[in-house]
Image (cartoon, rainbow, N blue to C red):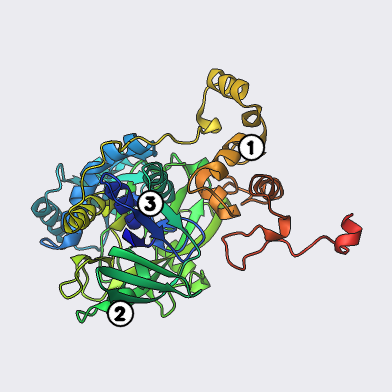
Amino acid sequence: MRDVIIIGAGVIGCATARELSRRKLDILVVDQASDVADGGCSKANTAIVHGGYDAKSGTLKAKYNVAGNAMFDAISQELEVPFERNGSLVVAFEGDDLSGLEELKARGETNGVPGLEILNQAALQAKEPNIGPTAVAALWVPTGGIVCPYELTVAYAENAAANGVQFQFDTAVDRLEAIPGGWRITTTSGETLEAKAIVNAAGCGSGRLNNMVSAHKLDILPRRGEYYMVDKTYSGTFHSAMFQLPSDKGKGILVARTVDGTLLLGPTAEDVDDPTDTRTTAEGLAKVLQFASRTWPNIPGRSFITTFAGIRPRPSDGDFRLGEAPDAPGFFNAAGIESPGLTAAPAIGVDLAGWVADYLKAEDNPSFQPKRTAIPKFRELSNEERAVLIAQDPAFGRIVCRCETVTEGEIREAIRRTPGARTLDGVKRRTRAGMGRCQAGFCSPRVVDILCEELGLQPTEITKFGGNSVLLTGPIGGEEAAQ
């Protein structure tokens, strides 16, 4: 019997695992997907570190949003994750009720958000010259920022693994039941796993797991959000994350630069029945463009790289559900963690790990190492730094992804790490190989080759994101022709 099993390898599960590894505990993280940040909203969201003005005062959302935001400077340095505190603007347009900005400012101040300020039209245009002409005022949120959500999740997981946490993927929970001294998980493949404590960080599945063991039922509903991504050629269009003031027309659409220089437009918000329904639709994408054009007139449609959709686990009562279930000792929820879950993750991880450790009376781990070293990013290095890296490993001198200038050395290191990339998407999230303008049209064959070489697999065994997402079914003409 292990000490702790964490169900869910998204940003909440991995942050909790890393914080728990500060104690002397036997910890396992399981996920039904094939990689960290692969099965839920940690891989597809707005990548925003929210200031905390929006959440209803007195809620867990408000508390953990502000607390998590304040931790990002330190955590991004410890884990070597790119983070920029570029600020956020909530923009009001002609016809909007400007009192809404005052309400958000007052709420933010109640929540403890520092530095909030309302800008008039002249000040707004001075800060963001490319804002649409009908923008008349904005709430300035200086503590807002941007981060790469899946890179943060991978960094948490790598640091947790370096401190002794184990990971097990392709592991879906079928049943969860109390046993003497702890809990038993039965997977869909028939495997049984046991632990003294369970952390439920299963995203859209968190309600189902809670309802297996507790009479205090949770209703977690999947909500889909659709996005456009714009080429990094336009990265200088806006400096801040550009929100829109919610109105009777809707909550508005975000226009925001990512830490990698691309721009995101979105998301929509549509309740769906299936938590795996990540389709994009003509209607949803049209809505994104309709609203985003208020912020950014004449959006350059020829510079769209891709469209995508993410699923958020929306709690029916509107707030996070955190902590030990009152009628299930040793079962700890991190349920209904929708936006601002990414921002809240560092603070949730600390508190959740603390509660579990107290329950288990765990001792401190004196060998805990808080630092994680990132894979060198060839595209960001000076020529002198590149020369040194290539001298150490010539693979860093061979470009595989032209769009993002990703080298063979980066891809091989991403595969060799723990937990390492095992799929095309796993390599993409760790290195950006395939995230550029051609969307993997050029580099995929070479990435497949490298995965085969590193993992000892055949090309037909390589998948895009695990499961049945195979890329190749066999050589043209059959095996004899290939020979």
Residue under numbered circle 3: 47
Task: Please state the horizontal and vertical placement of residue 36, each as a whole percent of the image.
Answer: 45, 55
Cα distance, mark 3 to mark 2?
32 Å
User: Could you classify mark 1 by the number of other residues whose Cα lies within 10 Å: few (under 14), some (14-19), or many (20 or more)?
Assistant: many
At a point 41% along the width and 78% down the height, the residue shown is 272
Task: Please state the horizontal and vertical placement of residue 458, each as a whole percent of the image.
Answer: 72, 55
Task: Count up the numbered dots.
Answer: 3
Front tag of 1 and 2: 2
Front tag of 3 and 2: 2
Looking at the image, residue 207 sits to the left or right of residue 289; the answer is left
Front tag of 1 and 3: 1
Residue type at the position of mark 2: Met
Task: Please state the horizontal and vertical placement of residue 294, each as a whole percent of the image.
Answer: 37, 57
Residue type at the position of mark 3: Ala
At a point 49% along the width and 58% down the height, the residue shown is 228
Looking at marks 1 and 3 on the same chain, the residue that comes earlier in the sequence is marked by 3
Label 1 secondary element:
helix
Cα distance, mark 1 to mark 2?
46 Å
Q: Which mark is residue 408?
A: 1
| 56 or 241, nearer to the observer | 56
Q: Is residue 464 visible?
A: yes
Where residue 1 sits, quadrant-wise, is bottom left
Looking at marks 3 and 2 on the same chain, the residue that comes earlier in the sequence is marked by 3
Q: Is residue 249 visible?
A: no
User: Could you classify mark 3 by the number of other residues whose Cα lies within 10 Å: few (under 14), some (14-19), or many (20 or more)?
Assistant: many
Cα distance, mark 1 to mark 3?
27 Å
Determine whether 165 is above or below 203 in the image.
above
At a point 33% along the width and 34% down the height, the residue shown is 77
Residue under numbered circle 2: 212
Looking at marks 1 and 2 on the same chain, the residue that comes earlier in the sequence is marked by 2
